Amino acid sequence: MQDVENKPVGEALLKVKDIRKSFGSNEVLKGINMELREGEVIALIGGNGAGKSTLMKIIMGIYRQDEGEIYIDGEKIDISKSSTALANGIYLVPQEPMLFPNMTVEENVAMGFDEKKNEIHKSMVEMIEHLGWDLKLERKANTLSIAEQQLVEILKGLLRNARILILDEPTSSLSFNEAESLFKLVEELKQKNIGIFYITHRLTEVFQIATHVAIMRDGVVSLSGEVSEFEKSHLVKALLPPDSELKTAGERVEIDYTSAEPVLKLEDFSGYGFSNLNLEVYAGEILGVAGVVGAGRTEFATTVFGMDKVKSGKVLLDGEDITGYSTRRVLDKGVNYVPEDRFLNGIFKIREVGWNISSAQIRNMSKLFLNRKKEAELADQYISDFRIKVTGQDQIMGSLSGGNQQKGVIARALSTNPKVVILDEPTRGIDAGARGDVYSIIGKLKKQGVAILLISSDLEEIVELSDRAVSMYQGHINHTFAREKIDLDNLTAASFGVYEEGE
């Protein structure tokens, strides 16, 4: 990939110049410059929130940039909608194929074409034969493997004369053999001078398939160039933040792991999106859980909490088997969960702050109108202790700032006096001041002897808060780190599947 100011002779297929994008006060893209040329595969890598998806959505016309320019074949193009991107040969193959399951391959591919059916059919047959794919047009989409569904999505792009393909985590659901087939296809597309953006978190794939690499971090490109110029260690370093802001949740606990009994224990625990997890969490301990999106972190948390079905294995709480318990029974036993998406799963936006905090105390409808005084006292206590900025308990929850909403969600979880709290991205989308309050709350939990599972995409957060840490990769725990081994380098390498013992 060439720098904008030093590009070689000949125009790039696509060039983005000084692209900027903000959502409210959050600046997501801070002046992105990038070029894609014929036959190039640019591996686009970055942690959660780095800006990769936002940039691709701008290129696809789903979002509109605040500043900056997009050029195709040297000509400035205003991509204000997806149809403009498609008309200019840009096609996105989504991470999760979006096919109509009860329609055939041919019916799915033909949607949106103005040509006659026989002409489209002929084009499909010729393209499939040319590519050498074993793909039957009459098959229903719901009979296809994930790999075959991705082939259909790619076929849709190629028949639309796509010259620029965006492949979003294309191997996330593929077997080894299916991934190898995809890599062969990418090689074929390179030979046909198609340019490809290849979004991935698997660093091993970068060296297998890409010609160029671009690392995004905090809305900027921190590293770019030909793959041959780099080693894995260079990519890992580029993923790390330049400076680390100290965060603390209080003093470290000293636990004798040889004699202490865990509060929560998972044994060969499997469910949707993860398998064979083994971990232990102890009283007064923060166990950090690192990993990128799709690693299975949230999935295992919701399954422990009874929101999703257990496939196999056990969940033990103080030695008691609570595997497959409903959410209500899990709560009653002493496990609570603060969800990643507070807007979707965490708060009742149209209800009062006081009701949101005390609602976890309501065990059945008969108690709904009982103990109002006690509930009010409880809500006041948490509002004061957590410094939730409200005009009163009757203020509507949805009117609070994100940080105060999050503190309210945590308050509700703690009102059940849990033995174990699972915190899923507890500081996502909140400001520095609110973060400090959340860390203080976590510190109080530790002092009370609560066992804490901290799931966070902010690796600095895990480094500074955790007593031990595990990393998840492709649905498995691939490494466990003692306190002295928890640092940004190790966690980043492990989250991207390239950590080696002894590093």
Image (cartoon, helix red, strand yellow):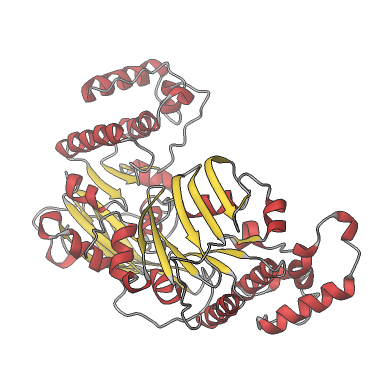
Given residues 220 and 297, the one toward you in this image is 297
Q: Residue at x 59, y 45 (%)?
A: 308
Given residues 210 and 250, the one toward you in this image is 250
Where does the image place residue 397, in percent across and percent down from the top left? 72, 70
Q: Is residue 136 left or right of residue 328?
A: left
Where does the image place residue 29, in percent across and percent down from the top left? 37, 67
- Quadrant (top left/top right/bottom left/bottom right) for the C terminus: bottom left
- Quadrant (top left/top right/bottom left/bottom right) for the N terminus: bottom left
In the picture shown, does residue 304 fall above or below 249?
above
Q: Residue at x 53, y 63 (%)?
A: 261
In the picture shown, does residue 101 fall above or below 338?
above
Q: Is residue 131 left or right of residue 463?
A: left
Q: Residue at x 26, y 62 (%)?
A: 215
Q: Is residue 438 visible?
A: yes
Where does the image place residue 64, in percent across and percent down from the top left? 43, 59
Given residues 235 and 103, the one toward you in this image is 235
Q: Residue at x 16, y 53 (%)?
A: 11
Given residues 24 and 341, the one toward you in this image is 341
Task: State the count of labels.
Answer: 0
Q: Quadrant of residue 75?
A: bottom left
Q: Is residue 72 visible?
A: no
Where does the image place residue 365, in percent across and percent down from the top left? 86, 55
List the single residue furthest toward the left: 9
Q: Quadrant of residue 487?
A: bottom left
